[in-house]
Amino acid sequence: MTLTSQHGFNYFNAIDNLLDASHIGFVHSNHVGGYDGRTDSAFLEVQETLWGATSVHTRRQSGKAGQTQFGMPNIFRVRMFPLAPGFPPREVIFWFVPVDDENYQRFFVEAIRMPAEKIETFLAARREVVAKQTFRPKDLAEAVVGGRMRREDVNPETTNIVNFVDDVAQLAQGRIHDRSTEHLGSSDVGMVLVRRIWLRELAALRDQRPLTLWRYDPSLPLVQSDE
Ligand SMILES: [Fe+2]
């Protein structure tokens, strides 16, 4: 299933978010598959791969671990939250594409493994969930960050709530985030690694040195920490 969504801020705000698994315990704490980051925050281990970078995030209290994959320059693979309670987890691949400095568009493909005889029932249930999502996350996030609406007043059934809360967190940092005032910590190691890779590659491009030949590897593991 191929899908798309629009977002009203610089696409690197979203790239910064990709290997930041620590935000799940805060921004997504009350979603299906979420957890409380105040009591069970994740310890992140990251490393460069042939495709980009990977994050293994192990929750400090429960010991549950998840793993995600970042692909240079703008791709992300994740086994993520179900769309709604009772739904199976999804494997999703995203492309984050700049439209201009203050807008980007996300394209993604969702894959869900299930027996063939369950597919029609699942698609009907999915259509029902999506039909109720009549408010764009982008518009709701603009209203919340602009002070015209409270985050708590958003009905989670009438929008894509995962996109909405991510957009609030990322838009609130500024359409173009001012990185000169940051105080990064251990939960930012994934973001730091991705930025270092980007800077290294851009420096090579500037100096006309060879760029890394990134290779997609479908065997890179994806783990949703609650399975
Ligand atoms: Fe998120």
Image (cartoon, grey):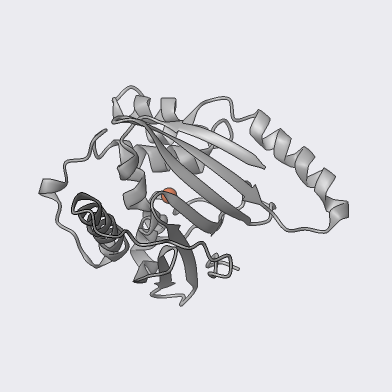
Which of 116/59 is in front?
116
Q: Residue furthest right?
A: 117
Quarter in which the C terminus is drawn: bottom right
Residue at screen point 54% across, 37% down: 160
- Is 161 placed left or right of 186 in the picture? right
In the rendered view, would you say 217 is above or below 16? below
Vertical arrangement, residue 71 with respect to residue 166, above or below? below
Location of the N terminus by quadrant is top right
Q: How many labels does the image show?
A: 0
Query: Where is residue 135 drawn, in percent x and y?
Result: 52, 25
Where's residue 121, x and y in %?
82, 45
State which quadrant residue 145 falls in.
top left
Question: What residue is drawn where x is 85% and y is 54%?
Answer: 116
Left or right, 91 with reference to 95: right
Q: Where is residue 206 in the image (x, y as percent from the top left)?
A: 20, 50
| Res. 198 image quadrant | bottom left
Percent position of residue 85, x then y: 65, 50
Of 191 and 161, nearer the camera is 191
Q: Residue furthest top?
A: 148
Q: Residue at x 33, y 22 (%)?
A: 148
At 44% from the left and 54% from the top, the residue drawn is 29
